[in-house]
Amino acid sequence: MHQLTLAEIARGLADKKFSSEELTKVLLARIAQLDPQLNSFISLTEDLALQQAKAADARRANGENGALLGAPIAHKDLFCTQGIRTSCGSKMLDNFKAPYDATVVAKLAAAGAVTLGKTNMDEFAMGSANESSYYGAVKNPWNLEHVPGGSSGGSAAAVAARLLPAATGTDTGGSIRQPAALTNLTGLKPTYGRVSRWGMIAYASSLDQGGPLARTAEDCAILLQGMAGFDPQDSTSIDEPVPDYSASLNGSLQGLRIGVPKEYFSAGLDPRIADLVMASVEELKKLGAVVKEISLPNMQHAIPAYYVIAPAEASSNLSRFDGVRFGYRCEDPKNLIDLYKRSRGEGFGPEVQRRIMVGAYALSAGYYDAYYLKAQKIRRLIKNDFMAAFNEVDIILGPTTPNPAWKLGAKNSDPVAAYLEDVYTITANLAGLPGLSMPAGFVDGLPVGVQLLAPYFQEGRLLNVAHQYQLNTDWHTRTPTGF
Ligand code: GLN
């Protein structure tokens, strides 16, 4: 049963082959048995899950239907869940039970999804390896000595190991697409504003976006359908109708114009990944796509710009964790300053502290113009490059990451080495564009992802291309040994 996709689960539940309660029990037992190897969950919500599963079965018995009704999922532990610990992977929020549900959580619950638990993540979503979590590193089910990617690494590892069919993630600079690539999943970062950020603990507000992680594009369509939509509680949510994503999957790719940026194939890219990317292009050509080389001339400036803007926003967002209003408070503070200093010094891990310092520096008087303002200008140039490219092509295709999953600990002493892994993903966040990563082969037994980018609100196009590719390839069906 654990091999079923969301689409297959929906059919099985509709045909009364099994109940949501039965399925939920099977998956909870599987998590108890296998997750100790992976550490993909921070909290399990067994009671809630069984209660939601029974309620979904009752709704189905009353004639209700719906692709998510009774479907087991999990939430990255930065989506607020009422009465349930919402830790953001941090000691700072280890004792924080959210007083309300995030919009994404509430919407999926209303659609009948069953929440099995909260997944592990890099502390405050800062990272690409899931090693900065207060709850310990997550392991990649494809090789337990390797990282699963981050920051949504718990969601990715759990879905890849077939502990559950799909999970939510968030993507500020690649945190859905990069762990999807490193664990052989399909992951989609929607257009900025497509999915509500209300109740999603903020890292960098102008870049953060929630989205689905699943094994197939078909399942991403189902989960995204339950997450997307206008939310008056989020001032950057966009009031655009949500299309039927599942209905968009079967469009023909005849004449689809694919742009492959020449800048993607620079020295940093593992040549074996480059070969797999070109093989995926050949596959799409067979389906009728036409390919064109394009240029994104400002791409080289993306990492420096991102690593100014994201920490700047983080330094501001994380100022609310002061030992007074939320979460961790140090023992016996001597005075107010001591309370602030020690609560933050003890509650935040080293990567979060590093980013708060970088961000506060970049925003400080005298440096603001040189760093933050400059980074914002680069951001506009990057967006302009994409707008020009999308005048010529329908989607942009390239690698999701320059390397496959690295060994646990391998990049710990050099934060910049980890930042460089984000080179292909962060441009979509800087421009606010939707992006998807899909499985496209293996290198040394480790999965490789291909990234597709589309114009604003063209999530359906991304899902369509990925689905057609998945109908003609079987990379996404491969299961890690032992799971
Ligand atoms: N790796 C990037 C960072 O550390 C992206 C993280 C994310 O998307 N949340 O900032």
Image: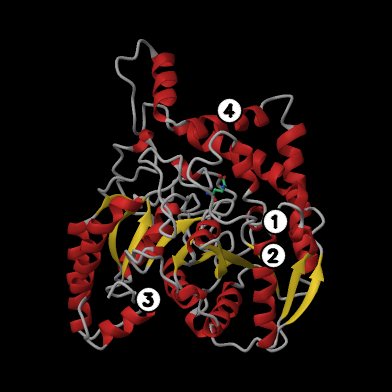
Q: Position of residue 86 (x, y in %)?
A: 34, 45
Q: Position of residue 463 (x, y in %)?
A: 55, 76
Question: Mark 1 against mark 4, which lies toward the viewer?
Answer: 1
| Residue 142 quadrant | bottom left
Which residue type does callout 3 highlight? Thr
Quarter in which the C terminus is drawn: bottom left
State the CA–CA distance, disc 1 to disc 3. Answer: 32 Å
Q: CA distance from mark 1 to mark 4?
A: 30 Å
| Residue tagged 4 | 357
How crowded pointer 3 is (Cα within 10 Å; few <14, some 14-19, many 20+) is rated as many
Q: Which mark is residue 320?
A: none
Residue beneath disc 1: 269
418 lies above or below 345: below
Residue that carries the numbered disc 2 in the rendered image: 274
Mark 3 vs mark 4, CA separation in Å: 43 Å
Of residue 74 and residue 216, the one placed in the foreground of this image is 216
Please state which amino acid type lies under the numbered disc 4: Met
Q: Residue at x 20, y 62 (%)?
A: 29
Please indicate, yes or no, whether residue 81 appears anywhere in the rendered image. Answer: no
- Indicate the position of residue 57 as horizontal and vertical percent values: 19, 76
Q: Tell me which residue sits at (80%, 63%) in the image.
A: 262
Q: Is residue 475 at least partly visible in the picture?
A: yes
Q: What residue did someone put label 3 on? A: 5
Front residue of 298/444: it is 444
